[in-house]
Image: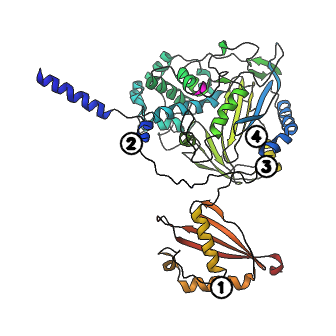
Amino acid sequence: MKNFLLLLFFSILLSSCNKKKPINDIESQVSLSFLKTYKAKSFLDDQRLEKIKEVKSEIKSLFDTHFKDNNIPGISYGIVVDDSLIISSSVGVSNIHKNIEVSTNTSFRIASMSKSFTALAILMLRDEGKLSLKDPVVNYIPELKSLNYLTKDSPILNIENLLTMTTGFPEDNPWGDRQLSMTKKDFVDFISGGVSMSKTPSYQYEYSNTGYAMLGYVIGVVSGVSYQDYIKNKILIPLGMYDTHWEYSTIEEEKLALGYRWEDENWRLEPMLHDGIYGAMGGLITTIKDFSKYVSFHLNAWPIRNDDNNGIVKRSTIREMHVPKYNFLNSWKRDWDNKPCAGMIGYGYGLGISMDCKRIKKVAHGGALPGFGSDYAFFPEYGIGIMAFGNKTYTSPMPSDKLEKLLFETLDLQGRKLPPSEILIQRKEQITNLITTENVNLVSDIFAENFFLDDTIEDRLMEIQRIRRVAGRVIKIHGISAKNQLRGDFIIQCENGDIKVFFTLSPEKVPLVQKMNVSFNANKKVMN
């Protein structure tokens, strides 16, 4: 008996040691050292609200035209700035037979826009220490033991593969769209029967609704409640999204948008699908007013700053969703004027992320199911989100290119700028004092040990002195443009042109100048 008790004691001790601690608990025990003087990005002249409100009629005209040109029964749309829905409107009908007009309180099925809720729930469970993104999915769905990988050297399917669409499962939009109401039992039977793969996991992107259905299943296993209840209690209710639902039959007929297909010059009513296991990939039903709260929630993650985390999840966790995990070049991209505009595009956690040739970063996702089409996009550096829901099969309800042209070309909205850090300002002043004196002097302790090993002090002096002679009298020293906390450039305006100084600081505790480029751009008068 004594040996048995000892064995029992050590067994309990080992199990308690192996048990994962919630990440939030671990972080609360660590004293995080941070720079209290850090300056967050900010708007230099914030006129976003006023400018956007001034073109409200133009925005309405864009949607009205899009509504007509694409023959959509009804559209509801909105624009969010920071935490406010500043423009919201609608056009058309939600129910053709009864001629019920669409409003911003009309409930639309938003299809794959639901995926980011699923991804967020997984990250919340990760933050609580209840799972790891590197966990094999088979740990939570044992039926995947029968999964037949393409090759012997395939990595095992993990949670992050499901999040980033790198599962190796085939693109399944036409098939997956019809599986929304699949029961949990049927889903388990489907997986047990074998799932076909088109690629090897981890290395290539391919859109998979089935992967997100698996994530919903994992959320239920880990949380001990249904996927739908977890999303409702952990995300929807805390964000005040009381008008967002899973099951269409719980919504009043007057409020529910019905879905349609245009076929043989007539409208055909698409059957509404009941909620089921595939709801994790596209089952949410919501309104523009409700969904605007979710858009604001994502916008609030930016800029990176020192404020306390008071939301339902850390801001850094939300920002993880906005980072593309598998980038590729979108060389065929064209801008809003239909001109070539290559960019990078990738998929994060339940969201697509892109940056075009104009360096505008967009986080977005569309949604499409029989009877419905939806889109939303937000621009983190601008604090702006746009969204639109429609009730026609696979048709985008948003004139995205025209809206973006209006916002970023016509209105010329500007994003947040990073203020220079104290050390950048200090080094800029010291560099200025060295190179604007009558006799250029580079003898200083502001330079790192590598600086004059990379180029001799004699060569540097000769080049800067040459530029100073050509540039002429100094007229004005402009402020520094910060690229990050330890890198920036500034302009020295002279009578014959501009001297541009770029420098970057070392990673030492007291950062020193490790690199400095000084160049001259003559004005037109001198060039002629």
Mark 3: amino acid: Asn
Mark 1: amino acid: Gln
What residue did someone put label 3 on? 338
**Marks 3/2: CA distance?**
44 Å
Q: As displayed, is residue 287 above or below residue 62?
A: above
Q: Please give the count of numbered marks on the rendered protein.
A: 4
Q: Where are the magenta residues, as a range?
A: 235-245
Where residue 32 appears, x then y in whole percent? 45, 48
Please tell me the numbered disc located at residue 400.
4
What residue did someone put label 1 on? 465
Q: Which callout, 1 or 2, points to the residue nearer the camera?
A: 1
Q: As displayed, is residue 488 above or below residue 4?
A: below
Residue at the spot 50% in from the left edge and 17% down from the top edge: 184
Tag 4's secondary structure?
Answer: helix
**Marks 1/2: CA distance?**
61 Å
Among numbered discs 1 and 2, the one appearing first in the sequence = 2
Q: Which callout, 3 or 2, points to the residue nearer the camera?
A: 3
Is 14 in front, or is 145? 14
Among numbered discs 1 and 4, the one appearing first in the sequence = 4
> Quarter of the image holding residue 399?
top right
Among numbered discs 1 and 3, the one appearing first in the sequence = 3
Farthest residue, direction front: 36
- Quick one: label 4, few (<14), some, or many (20+) residues within 10 Å? some
Q: Which callout, 4 or 3, points to the residue nearer the camera?
A: 4
Residue at the spot 77% in from the left edge and 14% down from the top edge: 254
Residue at the spot 65% in from the left edge and 67% down from the top edge: 489
Among numbered discs 3 and 2, the one appearing first in the sequence = 2
